[in-house]
Image: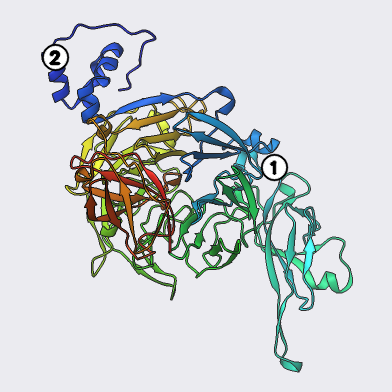
Amino acid sequence: MKIRHTGRTRRFALGSTVALTVAGMNAPAVLGFATGQYHHYVVNRPAYKAEYGHWQTLVLPAEFRINAIHAALLRTGKVLIIAGSGNNQKDFDAGTFKSLLWDPAANTYKAVPTPADMFCGGHTALPDGRMLVAGGTRRYEALDSAVKKAAGTMRVRNEDPDAARSLPRGTVFRAPNGREYVSTADLTVPAATKTGAGAATVVKASEVKVFAEAVAPGRDSVLDSPAQYTIKGLTGADARNLYGTADRMTLEKQDYQGIRAAFEFNPDTEMYEQVTDMAYARWYPTLTGLGDGRVVTVSGLDDTGQILSGNDNEIYDPASRTWSKAPDRYFPTYPSIFLTASGKLFYSGSNAGYGPADKGREPGLWDLADNSFHPVPGLRDPQLTETSSSVLLPPAQAQKVMVLGGGGVGESPLSTARTDIADLAAARPAFTPGPDLPAGGTRYLNSVILPDDTVFTTGGSSDYRGKHRSDLLKAQTYHPDTNTFSTAAEPAIGRNYHAEALLLPDGRVAVLGSDPLFNDKAGTEPGTFEQRIEIYSPPYLFHGERPRLTGAPAAAVLGGSIRVTTPAPEGVVTAKLVRPSSVTHATDVEQRSVALDVTARTADGVTLSLPANPNLLPPGWYMLFVTDAAGTPSQARWIQVTP
């Protein structure tokens, strides 16, 4: 039950016996019957904070409130929050696209000019600390009842092997029955390919897809069978060589459509810089950094609203700011794909929303070198991986990936409490059962690696997009060493679809967003986007003095060593480099915690050695934490890891 705080504080004279009793209880589970005042007292007790942690709610000034669809921690310690149009049709129609820079340390905010609708694109950090953002929204979905003009995918073909042809948006395609349809985007159709010579010459038409809709509204423009379309205004050879084909033109639901645009966000200038467009439009793609600094990009809905087939994966090279073709492999949208120490990519089965239930759902290891895919068996509830969370458990050297919760395909009300762990270092990688989620069936759970080698999980709902007031006001911490969950303090705000959580350099966790379908249990009141930020301080921040890093180099080399200074080197037990989060739709494939060996101690510091494997420790910026015997972490120092 959610506890509502009153507007004023009442003082209580509680004896030490009561305070000790409360501290010894599983406090978050017993607060349902407490008064708001008593709840406030309990959760602010030092003993409570030291056991369960503490939440704070941050309400941004009105002019800086945006719908947090994406969140990424930059090497400056600031958080880039991207809304784009923010799942708001009116903002999309008005061309109102938003991004915000939030500095958690100074609690300051800055609006960032946003040149395209990055809503539901993909993003990841590059080796130099820039943030690659690719894809987004070209057109919002239209439900059956809202579709007034028949529309569909037009495949525009060119049989001329000598020249490409450009066709502007608004090009008219005429069906055999005379009905006309217009394209909704500019396109260029490459020249056809020609092989052989003389009588053996073979010309293969090139083909480009574009979305087209009827000129006239109504059912008269519906075509339920495949047809070939002429292009209005073309004559002679052009009219013969250029034409369109479409399977159907319908009044059925029209899905979101993606864009090809890509940008790098520069943390120094705090501006977006446009780079080369992708070859394919993407909405709901996943971007995963590789050990050589490049980025593989997969899946998404294209600019006709169709899910990409898998022969359209791309690789981004930050050195040239260009894209090239990647090996073929189909995935549903926002697949959780992790770089492993072997250089192979592991698809955990987690995904977020589009694609058939019987295709591309099986977890496995994908080798880009030969495009082989080896299934990893053992995942329970395999039909409930949509909107699940996946995390590379700390330390990354263990090569274990955990899948937490999830739900059925589409708007299914089903959810699962299952957690399973894939051991990728085993001779035959397979999933084994983990502990059930304490809150039961959970979708949209966010999972954050903490610097004490635990994983904090929070939020989610038991039903699709929080329907029937199903948000779960629960949080817990997973302990990989014991394979158990411990209870954490309860958040005050429900989080479901379009929510994010990430680790801050000071060891706290920021939780943003949430986009419920409805505000009421009956499902009659449209939902409103949650614009408050919650900050969770884990228990380790209430265990007394923290280790301190008084000096650290700005850069480190793979396989090398670094020396850091600290006033208490004998107290440093562990050290790790934590890659900053880049999260959307409960999908964060970049966060990882890589353990460093403590190889020497002096009177004022310690020497740390780095792994040499770039697939384990991909080049880029990391937060360096050291911890003491109790797991209490220092504040982070930023270090750039280079080959």
Judging by the rendered image, the residue that carries numbered circle 2 is 18
Judging by the rendered image, the residue that carries numbered circle 1 is 148
**Residue 228 visible, this orientation:** no
**Quarter holding the N terminus?**
top left
In this view, 197 is above or below 94: below
**Residue 17 visible, this orientation:** yes
Residue at 35% over, 43% down:
448
Q: How is the image coloured?
A: rainbow
Whole-percent x and y of residue 634?
30, 40
For the residues carrying marks 1 and 2, which lies nearer the camera in this image?
2
Whole-percent x and y of residue 561?
32, 59
Disc 2 residue type?
A: Val
Name the side, left or right, on which 104 lies relative to 25.
Answer: right
In this view, 250 is above or below 497: below
Q: Residue furthest front?
A: 603
Residue at 62% over, 46% down:
272
Name the side, left or right, on which 217 lies relative to 421.
Answer: right
Disc 1 residue type?
A: Lys
Callout 2 secondary element: helix
